[in-house]
């Protein structure tokens, strides 16, 4: 029996979590779900959106499955997501983007890995108000943080038989900050002579990605570019409803989709649980249960490939619960 922290989030979070937990439970894997709520409602009842009990639970279980949590824009509490990643030092954000069966997209040969630095850059939250008309945000890049994410990306490439790692920066403009990131990338790359390297500026990359994505393999990026580029990559494979992710640190891992809490479709039973399910499949692999992971993936791919029961974002009419039940039916 595995113990896994379950953060069911808000917005569409509870709906897609319910679907994914039911699919996993039907797959035969024995998981004791340690449900931990977080977010705006929790801030009202407990005084903070990410209480210590949530962090303690992830530290104890070492693995979490997390649905999205809303972050108020402008005023209000700090992002639960950013805080969770920083408190647990989940420095590597892995966001694979690969074509899925049955989902028609402009390109059919997309197989990209985005490795995003998860703790530094403009997300370090160092913002100062100089006066009513002037504010500043600090782009924090450290040698230690850049080297460890670059090393993680190269290790990932090596373990997964990937041939190239591409560093994405704006080092022509942010000469010191992105310059340091790039310097670390070059230094770390010397330890991996069998893996090709490439360097590209983030604006050029965006243009190239929407014209010819198959020329790329693994990306490593500072936090902000990683956030934006991974949404672009999600668009290449069918949208946010199908884009998986994981936040990985030295001692624990939190698996969560790329997308947010989608308040526009909340409570309508139409959200696509695929992104959370793909994240959960990676979690099952992380637990070492490869056969069960494969079984769930086959059921998902069969459902997507047949195209009979699809959620609205994929061009279908099915409710979240109908899509869930079709996947459970396809579990063999
Ligand atoms: P979003 O990802 O929630 O939604 C963008 C668009 O994609 C919306 O039209 C939405 O309906 C659609 N969409 C997203 N997930 C979907 C799914 N599973 N099935 C079908 N359609 C889906 O981005 P948005 O609107 O910018 O953010 C909403 C909130 O989520 C914000 O408060 C933001 O801070 C938060 N957020 C949380 C994240 C997390 O918890 N890891 C990540 C990104 C945003």
Image (cartoon, rainbow, N blue to C red):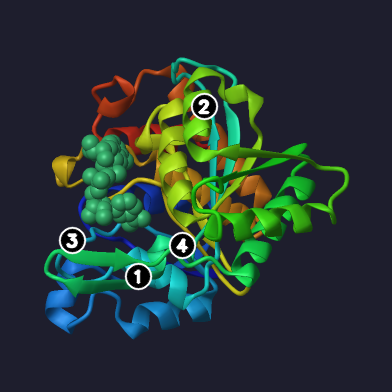
Which residue is outermost to the right? Answer: 193
Circle nearer the N terminus (4, 3): 3
Q: Badge 3 local density, few (<14 within 10 Å), some, or many (20+)?
A: few
Q: Is residue 27 visible?
A: no
- Disc number placed over residue 209 in the picture, else none: 2
Query: Which quarter of the picture shows residue 108?
Result: top right
In what quadrant of the picture does the N terminus appear?
bottom right
Indicate the position of residue 78 as horizontal and vertical percent values.
26, 70
Q: Is residue 234 left or right of residue 284?
A: left
For this rendering, which residue is in front, 122 or 220?
122
Q: CA distance from mark 4 to mark 3?
A: 20 Å
Indicate the position of residue 267 as horizontal and vertical percent values.
14, 46
Indicate the position of residue 205 as horizontal and vertical percent values.
53, 32
Nearer to us of marks 1 and 3 is 1
Q: Badge 1 local density, few (<14 within 10 Å), some, or many (20+)?
A: some
Indicate the position of residue 311 as horizontal and vertical percent values.
29, 29
Nearer to us of marks 4 and 3 is 4
Check mark 3 vs ligand 1: CB closer than 8 Å? yes or no.
Answer: yes
Q: Secondary structure at mark 2?
A: helix
Nearer to us of marks 2 and 4 is 4
Q: Which residue is mark 3?
A: 72
Q: Is residue 95 visible?
A: yes
For this rendering, which residue is in front, 237 or 229?
229
Instruction: Locate ligand 1 by image quadrant.
Output: top left
- Disc 2 and disc 1 in contact, CB within 8 angstroms: no
Q: CA distance from mark 3 to mark 2?
A: 30 Å
Q: Which residue is mark 1?
A: 125
Q: Is residue 220 left or right of residue 124?
A: right
Name the residue located 46 percent from the left edge and 40 percent from the top edge.
229
119 versus 309 height, above or below: below
């Amino acid at each position: 029996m595995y113990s896994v922290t379950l953060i069911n989030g808000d917005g569409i979070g509870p709906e897609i979590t319910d679907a994914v937990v039911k699919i996993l439970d039907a797959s035969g894997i024995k998981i004791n779900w340690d449900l931990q709520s977080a977010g705006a409602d929790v801030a009202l009842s407990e005084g903070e959106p990410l209480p210590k009990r949530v962090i303690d639970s992830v530290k104890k279980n070492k693995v979490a499955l997390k649905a999205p949590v809303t972050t108020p824009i402008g005023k209000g509490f700090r992002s639960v997501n950013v805080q969770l990643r920083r408190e647990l030092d989940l420095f590597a954000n892995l966001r694979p983007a690969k074509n899925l069966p049955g989902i028609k997209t402009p390109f059919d040969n997309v197989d990209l890995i985005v490795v995003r630095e998860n703790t530094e850059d403009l997300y370090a939250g160092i913002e100062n108000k100089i006066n009513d008309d002037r504010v500043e945000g600090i782009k924090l890049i450290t040698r230690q943080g850049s080297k460890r994410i670059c090393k993680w990306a190269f290790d990932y490439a090596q373990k997964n038989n990937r041939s190239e790692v591409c560093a994405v920066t704006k080092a022509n403009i942010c000469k010191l900050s992105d310059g340091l990131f790039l310097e670390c990338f070059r230094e770390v790359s010397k330890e991996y002579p069998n893996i090709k390297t490439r360097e590209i500026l983030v604006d050029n990359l965006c243009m190239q990605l929407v014209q010819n994505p198959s020329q790329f393999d693994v990306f490593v990026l500072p936090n902000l570019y990683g956030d934006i580029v991974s949404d672009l990559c999600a668009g290449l494979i069918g949208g946010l409803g199908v884009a998986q992710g994981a936040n990985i640190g030295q001692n624990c891992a939190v698996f969560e989709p790329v997308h947010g809490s989608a308040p526009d479709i909340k409570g309508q039973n139409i959200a696509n649980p695929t992104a959370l399910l793909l994240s959960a499949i990676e979690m099952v692999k992380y637990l070492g249960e490869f056969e069960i992971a494969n079984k769930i993936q086959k059921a998902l791919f069969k459902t997507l490939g047949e195209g009979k029961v699809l959620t609205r974002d994929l061009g279908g009419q099915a409710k979240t619960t109908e899509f869930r039940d079709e996947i459970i039916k396809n579990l063999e």
